Image (tube, rainbow, N blue to C red):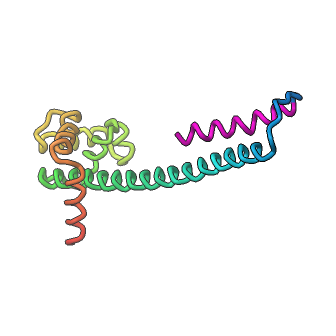
């Protein structure tokens, strides 16, 4: 609605300028009527600016809230990963390799990142899969996806926050 009012007000001012430049003159109206039209158009544009500012502030606030929720969910996901790694009894090296695998890195990329041989990484990923009772990377990832789907992310995030407060 406000956008329509702004558009009409803008058309009023722009058409007045265009008509003057082109030398097109409309039927004259009293100056009082003309002033009222201009005041109404200016008021409409001002109202649009105010409403636009309010909507922008709300959008920025909502964006900040969404980013906060995303950070909490991300933290909750990392807490979930660490919890599962602990349950499986992964070594620190296996934890690192498993995390890289979950992130989608190839065996060669993991080896380069960890500055180890590709064979070492393959052995570690096989140990991770064995301890997690899965057949491969996609099944490993699906374990975490299943956990996230089964447990609402907000609840996981709240649990993670409570654990941090207790510690």
Q: Nearer the viewer, residue 40 or 97?
A: 40
Q: Quadrant of residue 141?
A: top left
Residue 133 pos. (x, y %): 10, 39
148 in relation to 20, above or below: below
Task: Give the magenta-colored segment's residue range.
Answer: 1-21
Q: Is residue 4 magenta?
A: yes
Residue 137 pos. (x, y %): 23, 35
Q: Is residue 162 magenta?
A: no
Magenta part mainly helix, strand or loop?
helix
Residue in the image at 35% along x and 48% along y: 114
Q: Quadrant of residue 159?
A: bottom left
Q: Nearer the viewer, residue 134 or 72?
A: 72
- Location of the C terminus by quadrant is bottom left
29 in relation to 163, above or below: above
Residue 142 pos. (x, y %): 20, 37
111 in relation to 84, above or below: above
* Whether residue 127 is visible: no
Residue in the image at 83% along x and 35% along y: 28
């Amino acid at each position: 609605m406000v956008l329509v009012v702004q558009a009409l007000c803008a058309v009023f001012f722009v058409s007045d300028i265009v008509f003057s430049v082109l030398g097109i003159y409309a039927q004259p109206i009293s100056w009082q009527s003309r002033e009222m039209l201009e005041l109404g158009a200016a008021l409409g544009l001002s109202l649009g600016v105010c409403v636009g500012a309010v909507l922008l502030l709300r959008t920025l606030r909502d964006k900040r809230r969404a980013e906060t929720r995303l950070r909490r969910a991300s933290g909750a996901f990392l807490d979930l990963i660490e919890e599962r790694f602990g349950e499986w009894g992964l070594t620190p090296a296996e934890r690192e390799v498993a995390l890289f695998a979950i992130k989608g890195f190839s065996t060669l990329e993991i080896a380069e990142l960890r500055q180890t041989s590709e064979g070492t990484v393959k052995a570690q990923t096989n140990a991770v899969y064995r301890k997690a009772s899965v057949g491969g990377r996609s099944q490993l990832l699906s374990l975490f996806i299943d956990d996230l789907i089964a447990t609402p992310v907000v609840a996981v995030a709240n649990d993670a926050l409570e654990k941090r407060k207790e510690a």
